[in-house]
Every structure is written in C-alpha cells, then in structure tokens.
Image (cartoon, rainbow, N blue to C red):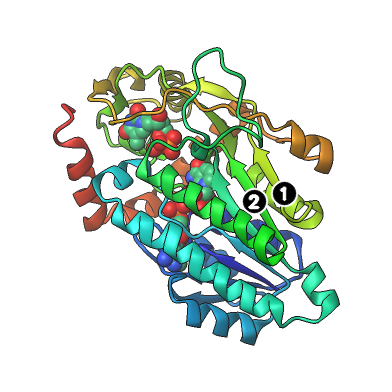
Amino acid sequence: MIFVTGGAGFIGSNFVLDWCAGSGEAVLNVDKLTYAGNLNNLASLKGDARHVFVQADICDGARMLALLNSHRPRAIVHFAAESHVDRSIHGPADFIATNINGSFALLEAARAYWSALSGEEGAAFRFLHVSTDEVYGSLGAHDAPFSESTAYAPNSPYSASKAASDHLVRAYHHTYGLPTLTTNCSNNYGPYHFPEKLIPLVIANALAGKALPIYGDGMQVRDWLYVSDHCAAIRRVLDGGRPGQVYNIGGWNEKANIEVVRTLCDILDREAPRADGASYRAQIVHVADRPGHDQRYAIDASKIERELGWKPAETFETGTEKTVRWYLANQAWVADVQSGAYLKWVNQNYDNRGT
Ligand code: NAD
Ligand code: TYD
C-alpha cells in the first residue's frame, strides 16, 4: 500500500480518488482534518476496503512511525501542509508547525521505518514530497521560467516554510540516503478546491452575487494546472523518478489574475447567466494588494516531460470549463464548507481591503 498525508485536502483527495480509480493498491490516508480537510471529498470511497482513513497530525512522529510499522507502505506521498499564502500572512505559526516541524517529524519516522526494511524493500521505498513553485520566488516579465536549478528565494511565510521542508527532504537523501523525490508544482485548480483560493472563490462569489476581489491591478501572473494533471504527474514521478531528484510540474498556462477572473465570468455567463442578463464581470472589484505579492510564477516543465514522458492533458480552456461545471453541479459541497469558520476568515481577509 501507499501512505498518503493530507489526503482529505484539495489535491490529496483528488489524488486518492484518481489512485483508487486506476489501481488496486490500497491507500492509507493520514490527515489531521484542519479547516482544509474534508472527508466529504472522499464520500465515493465509502465502503471501499482500499481506502483506510486515519485522523492524525504529522507532527506526532511516534504516531507516524507506529502507522508506518503497522501498515508497511512501499511509499509515502506527502501532501499535508498549510497551503494558503493569505492565511500565512495573518498567522504564520501553523505554517512553521506543520510544513517545517511536521515534515521533519514525518521524515524522521520515514527514516526509522525505511532503515529497518530489507535490502530489496528499502531500495524500492520512496518518500515523495509534494511542493510548490512558490519556493523559487517572483519572476520579472521577461525572466526565464523556473527550472529545477533556479535558486530558492521564497517571499511569504507559506513559501518559506515549504522551502524549508524541501531542504530537509534534500538533506535526508544526501545524508541518510533516504530515497526521496520532490515535485514543485504551479497553481492547481479543479474539483474540491477550497473557496479561499482565487478560482473557487470567484466562482462561489459570482453565483452568490458578491464582489469578485482582485488584489491590486490583477496583472500578477500564475501558471495554472488542472488538478488531475498534477495527480498524473505525481504518479509518474513515483513510478519512474530517480531518487534524490526534483521535478518541476506546470501547465504551460501563464495567465494574469484579471484574465483568469474574466475567463471564469465568461464561462459562467454561458453556463449560468445572471437573472438580469448582465455579465458576471460587473462584479469585479479591485481591492488592496496582498503584502509582498509575488508578481509572476512560471514553470519550465521540460525535465519531467523529457525524462518521464509527462505533459498536461488539459488546456486552461478545457480545465476551467470542467471546473465551473463541477462547482455548478456541487453547490451543496460549497455551501457545506462555507461554515462559520469560513465566514470568519472571509471577514479577516477582506473586511479592511475595501470590498
Ligand atoms: P489543502 O490546504 O487543500 O489541504 C491540506 C491537507 O493537509 C488538509 O486535508 C489538511 O487537513 C491536511 N493537514 C494540514 N495540516 C496537517 C497536519 N499537521 N497533519 C496532517 N494533516 C494535515 O492543500 P492542497 O492545495 O491540497 O495542497 C497539498 C500540497 O500540495 C501542499 O503541500 C501544498 O504546498 C502543495 N501544492 C499546492 C498547490 C496548489 O495550487 N494548491 C500547488 C503546488 C503544491
Ligand atoms: P491563490 O489562489 O491564493 O494562490 P497563490 O497565492 O498560492 O498563487 O491566489 C492566486 C492569485 O490570485 C494570487 O496572485 C493572488 C490573487 N488573488 C486575488 O487577486 N484575489 C483573491 O481574493 C485571492 C484569494 C487571490
């Protein structure tokens, strides 16, 4: 079996669902169920013996080791993290605890478990660390995209904590020989994306008749990847990646935020037109910028294509259409996650921004 952390979050739950759809191999899903973890994402696996869920904190190293020893996985795929830049600005402590100390505790447990494996099992074992392109910092408009050898320059508490975890993973390979793999991926979007992030927030706010908040001028650029493409890339790296290596994953889809929001409005105008016939674009509002906002991220994903034959299946056009349709068909899921705690976050992040 494989051992997945953070498998009740956005990307982790998509990964677990895709894994179970395409493989007979079992998944042990270890998740603390923070505000971002949601077992409803995995409802379709109810009664499926291949999916075992355990609520646990990766910071609890003794618990991680006990789970490894009792379930004997052949690999760990580590998604668990605090993942939202704006939350890291309001409260960085949880990011240090989970992303740095939690990854360290998990690495220590993995090292102890792996060291006791037989030669063949130990050689086949993998620790795959799921990370982000944000560790590389911010690009100028004409800079080359991030490659695996770009120097780290994280700018937010989130990206700094992910950078620290990447360095620990690297050190565990170089120092102890732990067979690690690291993936640094661009911005994901798709089903089960928590509506604190740009794309699901815009879809949910548009349908609720609320403002669509663009930070600053909206000219910041991100590279967008449909989540199932990220999951496929992770499976490919797990299967064929070389231990100790880093693989950048991206969609070759650089878009300015304002362009992303206008695209979503145009799809919604077709799929769920406003009662008054006006475009959802009328709800766009520019608000105060994010402090330290990175201007541009772009990924050179040629290494994973060259070495492992992966490239994205979805374009930005097909991925955003699918995403909008998923949110339209799953409004009960959105309503469920927009609980009291969610409203508190919305007030904290947007009330003093001028929306
Ligand atoms: P998410 O916030 O939606 O989910 C994180 C999951 O981790 C949640 O289920 C949460 O309950 C769990 N978790 C948090 N702290 C935990 C702890 N201490 N112990 C156990 N479980 C804990 O995040 P996501 O967007 O699915 O991102 C998953 C991973 O992918 C993260 O490591 C993130 O840095 C990375 N990543 C995300 C993106 C993106 O665009 N979302 C892009 C590249 C990389
Ligand atoms: P986000 O989805 O938070 O991802 P990240 O910060 O990890 O890239 O934000 C994507 C981009 O959208 C980022 O440049 C910030 C911007 N943004 C807004 O303009 N308005 C919003 O309300 C949010 C949440 C994000």
- Image location of residue 280, percent across then percent down: 35, 22
Q: Is residue 273 left or right of residue 298?
A: left
The local crowd at label 1, few if under 14, some if 14 to 19, many if 20 or more residues have their Cα within 10 Å, is some
Residue drawn at x 37%, y 19% is 218
User: Label 2's element?
Assistant: strand
Amino acid tagged 1: Gln
Quarter of the image with the N terminus in it: bottom right
Q: Is residue 201 left or right of residue 81?
A: left
Residue 66 lies in what quarter of the image? bottom right
Residue 208 lies in what quarter of the image? top left
Quarter of the image with the C terminus in it: top left
Find disc 2 in the rendering and name its residue. Answer: 182
Against 339, residue 258 (above or below) is above
Between residue 20 and residue 43, name the one nearer to us.
20
Between residue 155 and residue 267, name the one nearer to us.
155
Gap in Å between the C-alphas at discs 1 and 2? 7 Å
- Image location of residue 108, percent across then percent down: 56, 72
Q: Are marks 1 and 2 in contact (CB under 8 Å)?
A: yes
Residue at the far front: name it.
175
Residue drawn at x 57%, y 34% is 151
Amino acid tagged 2: Thr
